[in-house]
Image (cartoon, grey):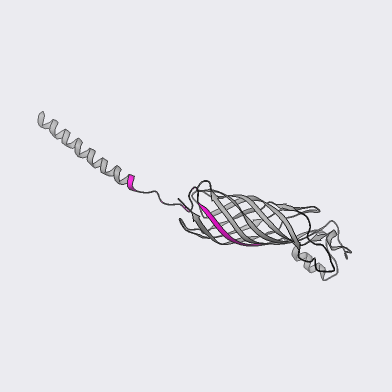
Amino acid sequence: MKNMTKKGLLALVLASALAGGVFAREGDEKPAAGKHQSFDMLIGLNFGVGVTPNMGDLYSSISDGRIPKGNYAMIYDFGLTYDFYLFNWLSLNTGLLFHPDIYLILNQDLRDSDNFTDIAASPVCLTIPLAAHVNVPKVEWLYAGIGLNLNFPIAGMFDGLAGIDTKGDFFVGLPIDIGFDFVRPGRGGGRFFVRITPEFHEKGSVAPIGFIWQIYNWKIYSK
């Protein structure tokens, strides 16, 4: 009986030691790093362009001396963005962009126009974007978001033509994004996504569609 008890105690000690070693090794293993972590901060260099789908109709009609009814726009973006990750899948974004914008809003067909600013404007804006984006869990390379662009016109691209003011007034945009995040875990990288940006001007709204290429995002802080 005593021998059986000793053997049982010895087996229990060996099992405990073995289990302790297994759990110790498991505790030493670190979880695989994801693309982003909470409190990551990135600075990105951006370029983007967008046009309304009906711009082709406009160009083909102008050669006939006619401007057809419709809302038209062509936009560009260039500047810096800042990302702060609340969680590994959710980031808040802001920045400062240069935003040239040409828009034309017509409620009826025109043969000519006496005053360009009655129907169009061509502001160069300083734009402050405010947005939230998600890296889809388990598919972290898929990147999507929505935001608010505050556009402050600082000049008109065609102001030098016969003294015409083409700057326009303050307006907002609501960019909606979906695309790909190529930032590498613990490092930097690019992003590329498609964007539709409904813009709300004094005379009406336009919705150009295009792309944003975040040429590179530098990870300036990571835990």
Task: Indicate the position of residue 41 as horizontal and vertical percent values.
Answer: 52, 53
> In the image, is residue 41 part of the stretch drawn in magenta?
yes
Instruction: Answer yes or no: is residue 171 visible.
Output: yes
Point 65% across, 59% down: residue: 97
Left or right? Give the position of 11 relative to 166. Answer: left
* Residue 153 screen position, x and y as percent: 74, 58
Q: Quadrant of residue 106?
A: bottom right
Residue 48 versus residue 6 in the image, above or below:
below
- Residue at the image position 83 percent from the left and 60 percent from the top: 117
> Residue 150 at x, y = what percent?
69, 52
Q: Quadrant of residue 95?
A: bottom right
Of all residues, the one furthest to the top in this rendering is 1
**Image point 83% across, 59% down: which residue?**
119
Is 104 on the left or on the right of 125, as rendered? right
Specify whether residue 135 is in view.
no
Magenta residue span:
27-48
171 vs 158: above or below: above
> Is 130 part of what is drawn in magenta?
no
Q: Residue at x 54, y 50 (%)?
A: 84
Depth check: give the residue in front, 149 or 50: 149
Which residue occupies the foreground of this view, 192 or 41? Answer: 41
For the N terminus, give its image quadrant: top left
User: Whole-percent x and y of residue 162?
Assistant: 85, 69
Residue 132 vs residue 6: left or right? right
Instruction: Give the answer, above or below, for where 51 lies relative to 173.
Output: below
Q: How many marks?
A: 0
